[in-house]
Amino acid sequence: MLFPGSSVRINGECLPEMKIRKSDYKIEFLVDPVSRSVLEARCPCVAGMNAKCKHGAALFTYVNCEMSEGKTDDAQSWQGPSKRAQNLYPKGEKNPEDF
């Protein structure tokens, strides 16, 4: 339940692009849930003042664009009928041996 004047805290981690041995960037947003505007933001990178950096943009885009569907929400697509089986039994055609 959201209360008037309340805010939502979003935390995320972003991997450094070039410096693999460096620790992850821990990004934090404070967002107004009604207007979806960012009230406060932080990122520890050099350009991260108010998280106006590529790490902040990546987290903000992910939060606003990512679908909440799981991998099992889609029909399985890795195994279907082979072309040979599709040609043997086209859809809509009845097999005379069944009757």
Image (cartoon, rainbow, N blue to C red):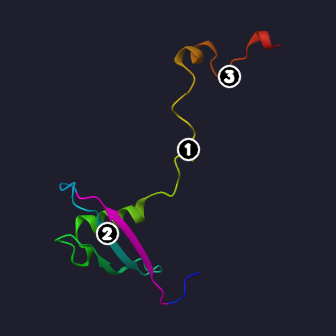
The Cα atoms of the two marked residues, 3 and 2, are separated by: 56 Å
- Residue receiving disc 2: 26
Q: Is residue 49 above or below residue 84?
A: below
Viewer-proximal residue among 16 and 96: 16
Q: Percent from the top left, x then y, of residue 44?
A: 24, 72
Q: Position of residue 77 (x, y in %)?
A: 53, 34
Residue 76, above or below 15 = above
Looking at the rendered image, the quarter that the N terminus falls into is: bottom right
Q: Is residue 73 above or below residue 76?
A: below
- Look at label 3 and name its amino acid: Gly
Q: Residue at x 47, y 79 (%)?
A: 33
Left or right: residue 64 compared with residue 45: right
Q: Secondary structure at mark 1?
A: loop
Which residue corresponds to mark 3?
92
- Residue 12: image location, x then y, percent: 37, 67
Q: CA distance from mark 1 to mark 3?
A: 25 Å
Which numbered disc, 1 or 3, marks the residue that appears first in the sequence?
1
**Magenta includes 82?**
no
Residue at which label 1 appears: 74
Q: Residue furthest bottom?
A: 5
- Quadrant in which residue 51 is drawn: bottom left
Q: Is 40 left or right of 53, judged from the image as shown?
A: right
Q: In the displayed image of the protein, which residue is found farthest to the front? A: 21
Mark closer to the observer (1, 3): 1
Whether residue 9 appears in magenta in the rendering, the answer is yes
Question: Which amino acid type corresponds to the residue marked 2 in the rendered image?
Answer: Lys
The picture quadrant where one finds residue 90 is top right
Q: Nearer the viewer, mark 2 or mark 1?
A: 2
Q: How many residues crowd around disc 1 within 10 Å: few (fewer than 14), some, or many (20 or more)?
A: few
